[in-house]
Image (cartoon, rainbow, N blue to C red):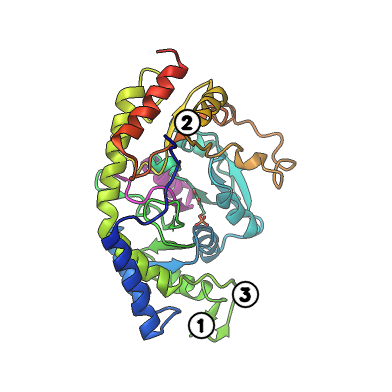
Amino acid sequence: MKISYRDLSVTDIQMRNELLGAVENVLRHGRISLGPELVAFEEHIARLCKKKYAVGVSSGTDALYLSLKSLGVGPGDEVITTPLSWIATVNAIVLCGATPVFVDIGEDLNINADIIKDAVTDKTKAILPVHFTGRLCDMDTIMEIAGANNLYVVEDAAQAFGASRNGEVAGSMGHINCFSMNPMKIYCAYGEAGCIVTDDEKLYHDLISLRYAGTINKEDCHVPSLNGRLDTIQAAMMLVGFKYLSQKQERLQEIADFFTNCLKDIVTCPEPDGSSHAFYTYTIITPQRDELQAYLNNRDIETKIQHPLLMPHHSAYKNQFSKIKLPVANRLVKQILCIPNHEKLQQKELEYIVKTIKDFYKL
Ligand SMILES: Cc1ncc(COP(=O)(O)O)c(C=O)c1O
């Protein structure tokens, strides 16, 4: 039995036909850029997030970069963030010319909101929390600190589409909120895609301009920017994806419940914290991470370490950030392991994963 970490093929015939039909429609009407499906997609996302505006963009990286730009984040500004995320998070800050300030994580792998206030200086412009693995950060505390210090909050909800706490969904709690919809994500496109949501009308208009070369009326450039438009075809396919999303989310929850039930006494599993976790990844924590990963790999179970490097330790950044102290992140980054959790996994495959982990621990 070979178990892949993800399976991105579309095996549901009805869904495949609907996806192909959606592409066909776009090819027929020919509004390949900024077409009607993009508008429908944006309206749908805005509704889901209970926000006034959504702006489709070409990736989660663009979503972060353009959001920071729209807030005027630039040279001389500091942006507080977590050290544990995909590198896009810090790249977006640095590409704006600002300085990232890393605050250590907690045992839940998210930024430790209780120590953010110690990192606030008179240069701080924004806080950029990441709902890592699909589990929500402590947004109440983060918004409180932001309010008290007049800071913006840019939510990186790239991994957390569908996560919620007390009726508030990921991507609805910051001043400006970012999603990635790349093919690995729970709610995904069939290529690169992302989205930004906000209630702020000025930011919305700025984002519309920033995603298309900083132009007004698609012609006159008033601020240099990139081309970050989301293709109509991707939006059309994602509109189809909405119909199939809840069954995927339910299956991810079932898989997570099964793993937690079977593994919680053996390794550290994502602990329930009163929020609904999106389970972008099912990440276990164990001091024998490398040995366990090799053992699973030798038995045809593909796993991933997301991520093996903290952001400040990537080659591009390590000289600049060699002195920062991140004791919890430094410990946990050596212990995290993502086991397969995609919706196509069969019960016998889940049982094989659990049995193999138990065998490793000689249980
Ligand atoms: C937390 C986080 N932020 C940002 C991104 C960037 O998104 P994209 O790959 O769509 O550019 C990702 C993508 O994996 C991510 O996981």
Q: Does 140 lie within the magenta span?
A: yes
| Mark 3 lies within 8 Å of ligand 1 (Cβ measured) | no
Q: Position of residue 297 (x, y in %)?
A: 52, 31
**The N terminus - image quarter:** top left
Q: Which contiguous range is marked in magenta? A: 139-164
N-terminal of the two: label 2 or label 3?
A: 2
Q: Which residue is mark 1?
A: 216
Q: Say which of 53 and 145 sits in front.
A: 53
Q: Position of residue 324 (x, y in %)?
A: 66, 34
- Contact check, label 2 and label 3, Cβ < 8 Å: no
Residue 106: which disc? Answer: 2
Q: Which residue is mark 3?
A: 224
N-terminal of the two: label 2 or label 1?
A: 2
N-terminal of the two: label 1 or label 3?
A: 1
Label 1 sits on what residue type? Ile
Left or right: residue 84 compared with residue 18: right
- Contact check, label 2 and label 1, Cβ < 8 Å: no
In the image, is residue 241 above or below residue 294? below
In the image, is residue 3 above or below residue 199? above
Query: Could you tell me if residue 146 is visible in this image?
Result: yes
In the image, is residue 208 above or below residue 195? below
SS for callout 3: loop
Label 3 sits on what residue type? Pro
SS for callout 2: loop
Gap in angstroms between the C-alphas marked 1 and 3: 11 Å
